[in-house]
Image (cartoon, rainbow, N blue to C red):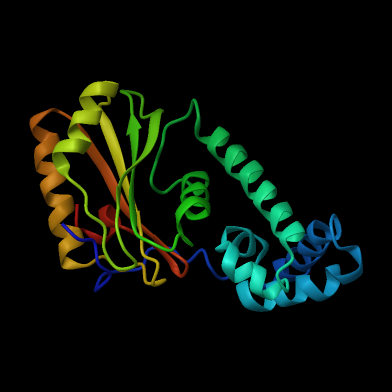
Amino acid sequence: MGLVCSTGTRDRDMAAPEATEAPGCRRALEELISLTSPARAQEFSERLFARFGSLGDAVSARSAERIELLEDSLEIEQTFLCFRRAMTQMLRGQLMQRPILSSDEHVLDYLRGRMAYEPIEQLRVLFLNANNELIADEVLGVGTVAAVHAWPREILKRCLDLEATAILLVHNHPSGCPRPSRSDRDLTERIAKAAKCLDVVVHDHLVVARNGTTSFRKAGYL
């Protein structure tokens, strides 16, 4: 079943930074770049900020997009990759030993950092225990720039393997549009029905994109 961006409701726009954050973002980008290229740090930070609008989006963006703006500097790009890995681990650490809620800012930031700029669609599943704490975070479906194939049977099999009692579904839209399609909603309904037979709760399905995030639960699709 393909997951394709069509119509729906945007729940939260995490792409546009507040105006008051702009100077701090520029400064942080400049300091990061200066670790490997101090002479051109200001110039490159201005380019990245003009293109991506915030530190978070510049770090989360695809390497090819950054490298072009950095004039093919692999040294600076390696700095960004190391920083991104560190930030991902930090955000993931904030999810441990606490209830996972689809409206939680830490959850949304983590998922946006992991998925919003991926060049192809992927379906990620957060497996939760009875206290809604994270057991596992796995990608169970990958596809193309416009669709991903996922199988409810495989998702529920992993629930049994991990003894998960609840799941949070997440997939990205490389187009930047966070609106779920009809096929997105159909697949979610199939997974929810199968999960109910095994007493597994589907807390939500989030669509993550550069221009925002849609919650199926808040949009009334789940």
Say which quarter of the image contains residue 184: bottom left
Instruction: Name the spot of residue 159 as percent of width and height, x first.
Output: 24, 28
Residue 160 lies left or right of residue 36; in this view the side is: left
Instruction: Name the spot of residue 206 as percent of width and height, x first.
Output: 33, 54
Can residue 17 be spotted in the picture?
no
Numbered label tally: 0
Depth check: give the residue in front, 6 or 68.
Answer: 68
Instruction: Name the spot of residue 56 as percent of width and height, x first.
Output: 62, 59
Q: Residue at x 16, y 63 (%)?
A: 183
Residue 118 lies left or right of residue 35; in this view the side is: left
Residue 12 lies left or right of residue 188; in this view the side is: right
Up/down of 220 relative to 91, above or below: below
Query: Which quarter of the rendering shows the N terminus?
Result: bottom left
Say which quarter of the image contains residue 160: top left
Up/down of 154 relative to 2, above or below: above
Q: Residue at x 37, y 72 (%)?
A: 177
Residue 173 lies left or right of residue 72; in this view the side is: left
Can residue 154 be spotted in the picture?
yes
Up/down of 198 relative to 140, above or below: above
Instruction: Name the spot of residue 106 as percent of width and height, x first.
Output: 52, 45
The residue furthest right is: 39
Depth check: give the residue in front, 145 or 92.
Answer: 145
Q: Residue at x 76, y 63 (%)?
A: 29
